[in-house]
Amino acid sequence: MKVQEALKEEGNNKVEKSELLFVSFNQDFGCFACGTESGFRIYNVDPFKETFRRAFRGGGIGIVEMLFRCNLLALVGGGSSPRYPPNKVMIWDDHQNRCIGELSFRSEVKAVKLRRDRVVVALATKVYVYRFSDLKLLDQISTQVNSRGLAALCADPAHNVLACPGVNKGHVRIELYDSRKSTIVAAHESDLCRLALNSDGSLVATASDKGTLVRIFDTHTGAQVRELRRGVDRAIIYAIAFDPDSKYVACTSDKGTAHVFSIQSHHTTQASSEKGTAFERTNSNTSSQRHIASSPPNASLSGRGGTTAQGAQPNNAKSNLSFLRRVVPGGLASSYLESEWSFAQVHGLEAPTICAFGTQPNTLVLVGADGSFLVSNFARGGEAERLTFAKFLNSSSDTARGGGGGESDHQTTASTSIPPPQPTSESPSIVTGASEPLPIPPSQQTSP
């Protein structure tokens, strides 16, 4: 998540005071990385601790993407004094304390995604796919205007799946590279706001800029398999995450609430994609609905969700008024009455927040743009039990001490001539027990 953009989008008046520029989980959600005005930091989730930090003299990092717990990272400059140009992706080897490759573009880099054999770069209207070993261009995809840099890459080496916006509004394009197949999903009628793949790339979850619904689709067939309701008033979705076993989906928004949904049941939503989209369009113009909370109204639900028996799978909350759909005409009311609401929630989030499922059962990890770290247990349903809270970035002074286009709009360079940053006293490895670095050959330049 680009912190500054998220704060601006929600109209937060603390935009200029934030030293945190970027925050993102790694591929297995066991770590998260932060880009700041003076470098980057790596944190372990369980147990929570700062594992490593790299400080650059007057150099902000606007994007830092980890490769599991390896010593290789992708860096993009950002902030008031960027360490690198915002149109370049730098491949940083922390064992060597220098950049060993770069990807140059004609426009700003919106996002970078990594897996062991691929580098994916999202620009405003293009997504590029490179082979990691030699930075050779493998694919390029045209997209709808993608200011948020939406792209999801399956990290499982057995499933090579990429999801990104399509060329039409609200459409998702899914590349199944193993089977050489593309799937186009008409997910929403309005612009996409967020998307995420599950661990094996078989499911993709999407949300539009209306923020009322999260829809889940089969990546091979494009069929909608679930429709989940965050709320009925408009919201900005900051993150969507699957748990490793695809039993749950969570999302966060500017309403200050994280929602957890159960998706393990084989029951699929009865509402069609068209019906759900029509609801979003109608609701955006219906001010009388704005009083309805983003969490399910307790007085109208069949239960708060949660486990009904020890070890049982929790059920999403549904309306006790669902019998009215027999007499109420279709459209807005029918869609609302048939909705699946979250069975567990975390309220009181004070800043844009990303989410992931923890290593412990039934735990949700939340990392905020205000430097907050929170772990909650959602097993009982309803309001989740808060287990751990910490502040990993307390103030701007703490950070300052931090020691701590077209086909021709890009260029690839693997080089030994990039000057390394000033050395620090920190250990050169990011995480103990890191994977072996991937080889990148010396001095090579290609163009498409």
Image (tube, grey):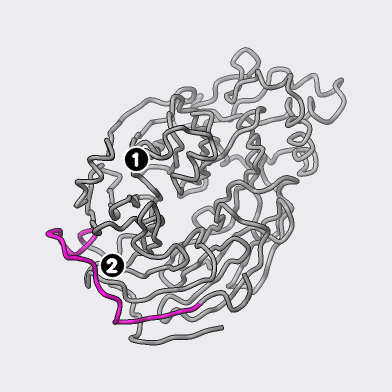
Find the magenta span and give its range.
411-432
Which residue is located at x 67 percent, y 37 percent?
A: 210
Q: Against 87, is 148 above or below?
A: above
In the depicted structure, whether residue 132 falls above or below residue 334: below
Residue 343: quadrant of the picture: top right
Measuring from the top left, give residue 271's x and y in whole percent: 76, 37
Q: Which residue does the image show at 46% across and 32% down from the upper left?
A: 13
Within-10-Å neighbours for mark 1: few <14, some 14–19, many 20+? few
Badge 2 amino acid = Ser
Residue sitting farthest toward the left: 425
Q: Secondary structure at mark 2?
A: loop
Identify the element where label 1 is drawn: loop
Q: Residue 203 location in percent, x, y? A: 59, 53
- Report if residue 419 lies within the magenta region: yes
The amino acid sitting under disc 1 is Gln
For residue 345, which numbered disc appears in the image?
none
Compared with 230, 439 (above or below) is: below
**Residue 272 seen:** yes
163 and 290: which is toward the camera: 290
Q: Nearer the viewer, mark 1 or mark 2?
A: 2
The quarter in which the C terminus is drawn is bottom right
Q: At which x and y percent is residue 19?
A: 33, 44
Residue tagged by mark 2? 435
Whole-number angstrom distance, CA of label 1 to CA of label 2? 23 Å
Q: Is residue 372 left or right of residue 338?
A: left
Residue 347 lies in magenta, yes or no? Answer: no
Q: Which residue is mark 1?
A: 360
- Per the picture, the main secondary structure of the magenta-coloured stretch is loop
Q: Position of residue 15 (x, y in %)?
A: 43, 38
The answer to which of marks 1 and 2 sits earlier in the sequence is 1
The residue drawn where x is 79% and y is 32% is: 282
